Image (tube, rainbow, N blue to C red):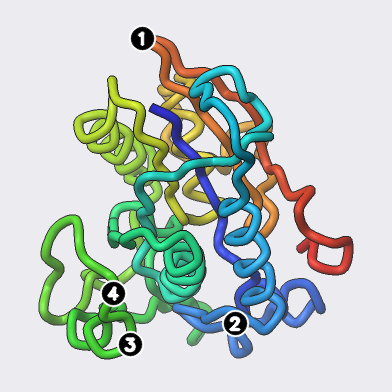
């Protein structure tokens, strides 16, 4: 099995942070892609679709020079990830499957300060009706609540590492030992947790913010992991050489 983590394209929140307009009033709890983010998604889709004729060699192509040959695409149910995953899946003519557990750290929420106290919004995220209307091609790995996939509030800081372990276990259960090439369209923060559980880094510390390192994931960048017997090989990280300079965000 090969596993590819792909960060979503630039979101409206990403763009606002980039221009230093990161105030809570300017942010969305579930942002969509910018025009630049859509273009990034189109280019990563084109890159993933490239294929060179010749004999396939599953393991001895560490830079995917012969192509990717993806067989499965999963995505978070946050709008920016669904949009990115849809563009990729349509280009590759592959099914897109929603995997709620690969959402960004914290979930769907906004924070505001009222009378010197932090208030957290209570939002459910998109529901099945929204998905059926706007993304009829998207199927679900498991059913979601009728009110929306996110139960509301802010995810406790102790949960993302456990959630990442659950995602890894699920992916292994469905694909380990096969020649499947699996892509997950997810988020930068959660990708850090997934990498940690795959490589067993600091398992005793549940909160990434307390560690003295953090990996950077550019929008639509690709990271590849090969599962060989009982080993996980990190082949490359944050690959975005297929994007022009003005689309590196």
Say whether disc 2 or disc 1 marks the residue closer to the N-terminus: 2
Q: How would you rate the neighbour count of disc 3 (Cα within 10 Å): few for under 14, some for 14-19, many for 20 or more?
A: few
On residue 230, the disc is 1
Instruction: Kindly indicate whether the residue at mark 1 contacts the one at mark 3 (C-beta within 8 angstroms).
Output: no
Label 2 vs label 4, nearer the camera: 4
Say whether disc 1 or disc 4 marks the residue closer to the N-terminus: 4
Marks 1 and 4, how far apart in space? 35 Å
The residue under label 3 is 134
Say whether disc 3 or disc 1 marks the residue closer to the N-terminus: 3
The residue under label 2 is 24
Say whether disc 3 or disc 2 marks the residue closer to the N-terminus: 2
Marks 3 and 1, how far apart in space? 40 Å
Marks 2 and 1, how far apart in space? 44 Å
Percent across and percent down for residue 126 are 29, 80
Which quadrant holds residue 215? top right
Judged from the image, the secondary structure of the residue bearing numbered disc 3 is helix
Marks 2 and 4, how far apart in space? 33 Å
Instruction: Kindly indicate whether the residue at mark 4 contacts the one at mark 1 (C-beta within 8 angstroms).
Output: no
- Residue most extreme to the right: 245
Residue at the image point whose x is 43% and y is 11% from the top = 231
Instruction: Kindly indicate whether the residue at mark 4 contacts the one at mark 3 (C-beta within 8 angstroms).
Output: no
Q: Is residue 118 visible?
A: no
Marks 3 and 4, how far apart in space? 9 Å
Percent across and percent down for residue 30 are 45, 78
């Amino acid at each position: 099995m090969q596993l590819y983590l792909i960060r979503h394209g630039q979101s409206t929140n990403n763009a606002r942070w980039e221009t230093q307009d990161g105030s809570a009033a300017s942010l969305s709890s579930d942002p969509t892609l910018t025009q630049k983010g859509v273009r990034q998604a189109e280019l990563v889709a084109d890159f993933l679709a490239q294929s060179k004729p010749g004999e396939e060699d599953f393991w001895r192509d560490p830079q995917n020079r012969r192509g990717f040959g993806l067989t499965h695409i999963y995505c978070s149910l946050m709008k920016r990830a669904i949009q990115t995953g849809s563009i990729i899946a349509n280009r590759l003519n592959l099914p897109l499957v929603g995997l709620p557990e690969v959402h960004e750290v914290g979930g769907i929420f906004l924070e505001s300060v009222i009378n010197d106290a932090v208030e957290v919004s209570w939002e459910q995220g998109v529901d099945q009706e929204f998905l059926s209307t706007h993304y009829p091609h998207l199927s679900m790995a498991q059913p979601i609540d009728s009110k929306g996939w996110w139960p509301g509030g802010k995810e406790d800081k102790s949960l993302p590492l456990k959630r990442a372990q659950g995602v890894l276990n699920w992916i292994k259960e469905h694909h380990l030992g096969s020649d499947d090439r699996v892509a997950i369209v997810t988020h930068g923060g959660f990708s850090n947790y997934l990498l940690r559980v795959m490589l067993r880094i600091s398992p005793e510390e549940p909160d990434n913010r307390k560690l003295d390192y953090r990996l950077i994931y550019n929008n639509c960048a690709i990271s590849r992991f090969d599962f060989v017997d009982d080993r996980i090989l990190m082949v490359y990280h944050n690959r975005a050489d297929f994007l022009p300079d003005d689309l590196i965000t």
